[in-house]
């Protein structure tokens, strides 16, 4: 990180010299930390112009449509790697050697079971509880079951916690689903891959051996990879903020799950299916395309364009390939899925969408894939949380491993000035 200088001029004050840092990739960053001593601080709602930390994990260039994990493009990782290899990369900074990968995969496979007492924990929830509500509660309670590894100052404890979370999240997620539908919990199988095991626990029953389609397992693995990390988003920032207080890692991940549950963050692929329900039929597409182009109409095409990526979502092309593979294998004649494919075809060929760069994003395709697999929309964000756990724990560990301060944002106060208390019988 090279350092430059900037001069801040404020009326009635002496010039203030601030350090400017140049990152390995991206925009220069002005260090405003010294402003507090001069009775000043910055105003940045949503922190959209503020770097809250230094990180070596993920880099996004929204203008160019780039997403890099530890320097590797998401397209290469999603097409040539697998989820557990990406987990190792995010946690350790380098791709594993064959021996390291074998050891890592073996460790994850041997920690997929959860404490048997957790089965009874689930029974405290209503059967119709939202799976995200159940997941928040269960993950937050893990510190009560695995309190032998919550010394955040101990690197070995942090590593054990990371392994446990990555290994057990598919089991916990599948149990959320099974509990909701009244089916028996399925124990994990160590002979299956990570994504195969998740599908086994989701859809398997004790009545017969699970048969997992390689195409569906590959698509699920890609969904996991493409959602593994996305820089300092709302949930990752929440995990870091909670972690800055010294909270145990399970509580921090539960905080991240809670932030992800908000529809503005983790509900995009569910919103795609809701939009398809609203459109209803292929015959209505032209009408809704016109509504999307009308600036005075509040209707928006969900799953097209992206807040971060101003060009195209680099995850979308890989997900599109898996989407078409899944639909081709399953041969589904679902009107909603046929509608989605027709909408994709029109949007990709319409000059308006090309000009506005409103291309289908990862959420458009992932929602269709999950729907085709038979996964209910209430589970979409649970799967997102499962995928993102490695990103959360990697950021948490990066923060805890280095000098850090407890998060304490400031505010622009616009309330009443100081005033005297008036007794109740004297108030008018």
Image: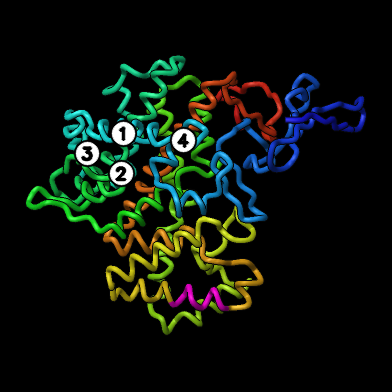
Residue that numbered label 1 is attached to? 108
Q: Which residues are the magenta region?
A: 342-349
Cβ–Cβ below 8 Å for labels 1 and 2? yes
Q: Residues within 10 Å of mark 4 (few under 14, many from 20)?
A: many
Camera-side residue: 345 or 85?
85
Which residue in the structure is indicated by mark 4?
392
* Precedes in sequence: disc 3 or disc 4: 3
Residue furthest front in the image: 98
User: Cα distance, mark 4 to mark 2?
Assistant: 18 Å
What percent of the width, then of the height, locates residue 164? 32, 29
Alpha carbon distance from label 4 to label 1: 17 Å
For residue 247, what is the image quadrant? top left
**Residue at screen point 50% across, 81% down:** 287
Are the residues flagged by discs 4 and 2 in contact, CB closer than 8 Å?
A: no
Would you identify the image quadrant in which residue 65 lies? bottom right
- Foreground: 200 or 254? 200
Residue 106, position in %: x, y? Answer: 29, 33
- Tag in front: 4 or 1: 1
The answer to which of marks 4 and 1 sits earlier in the sequence is: 1
Chief secondary structure of the magenta portion:
helix
């Amino acid at each position: 990180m090279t350092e430059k200088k900037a001069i801040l001029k404020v009326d009635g004050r002496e010039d203030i010299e601030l350090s400017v840092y140049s990152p390995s990739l991206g925009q220069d960053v002005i260090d405003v930390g010294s402003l507090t001593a001069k009775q000043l601080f910055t105003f940045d709602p949503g922190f959209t112009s503020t770097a809250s930390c230094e990180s070596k994990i993920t880099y996004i260039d929204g203008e160019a449509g780039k997403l890099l994990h530890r320097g590797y493009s998401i397209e290469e990782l999603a097409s040539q790697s697998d989820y557990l290899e990406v987990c190792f990369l995010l946690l350790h900074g380098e791709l594993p050697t064959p021996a390291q990968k074998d050891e890592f995969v073996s460790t994850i496979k041997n920690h997929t079971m959860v404490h048997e007492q957790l089965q009874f924990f689930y029974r405290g929830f209503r059967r119709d509880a939202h799976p995200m509500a159940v997941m928040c509660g269960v993950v937050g309670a893990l510190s009560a079951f695995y309190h032998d590894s919550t010394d955040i100052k101990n690197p070995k404890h942090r590593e054990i916690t990371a392994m446990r979370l990555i290994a057990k999240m598919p089991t916990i997620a599948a149990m959320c689903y099974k509990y909701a539908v009244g089916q028996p919990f399925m124990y994990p199988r160590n002979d299956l891959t990570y994504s195969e095991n998740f599908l086994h626990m989701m859809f398997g029953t004790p009545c017969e051996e699970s048969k997992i389609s390689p195409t569906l397992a590959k698509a699920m693995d890609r969904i996991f990879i493409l959602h593994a990390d996305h820089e300092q988003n709302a949930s990752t920032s929440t995990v870091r903020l909670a972690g800055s207080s010294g909270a145990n890692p399970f509580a921090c991940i539960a905080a991240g799950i809670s932030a992800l549950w908000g529809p503005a963050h983790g509900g995009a692929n569910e919103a795609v299916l809701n939009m398809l329900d609203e459109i209803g039929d292929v015959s209505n597409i032209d009408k809704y395309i016109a509504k999307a182009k009308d600036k005075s109409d509040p209707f928006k095409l969900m799953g097209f364009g992206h807040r971060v990526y101003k060009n195209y979502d680099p995850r979308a092309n890989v997900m599109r390939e898996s989407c078409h593979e899944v639909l081709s294998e399953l041969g589904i004649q679902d009107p909603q899925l046929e509608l989605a494919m027709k909408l994709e075809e029109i949007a990709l060929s319409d000059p308006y969408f090309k000009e506005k760069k409103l291309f289908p994003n990862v959420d458009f395709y992932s929602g269709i894939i999950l729907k085709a697999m038979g996964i209910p929309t209430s589970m979409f964000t649970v799967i997102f949380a499962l995928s993102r756990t490695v990103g959360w724990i990697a950021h948490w560990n990066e923060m805890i491993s280095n000098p850090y301060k407890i998060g304490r944002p400031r505010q622009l106060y616009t309330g009443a000035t100081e005033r005297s208390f008036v007794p109740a019988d004297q108030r008018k």
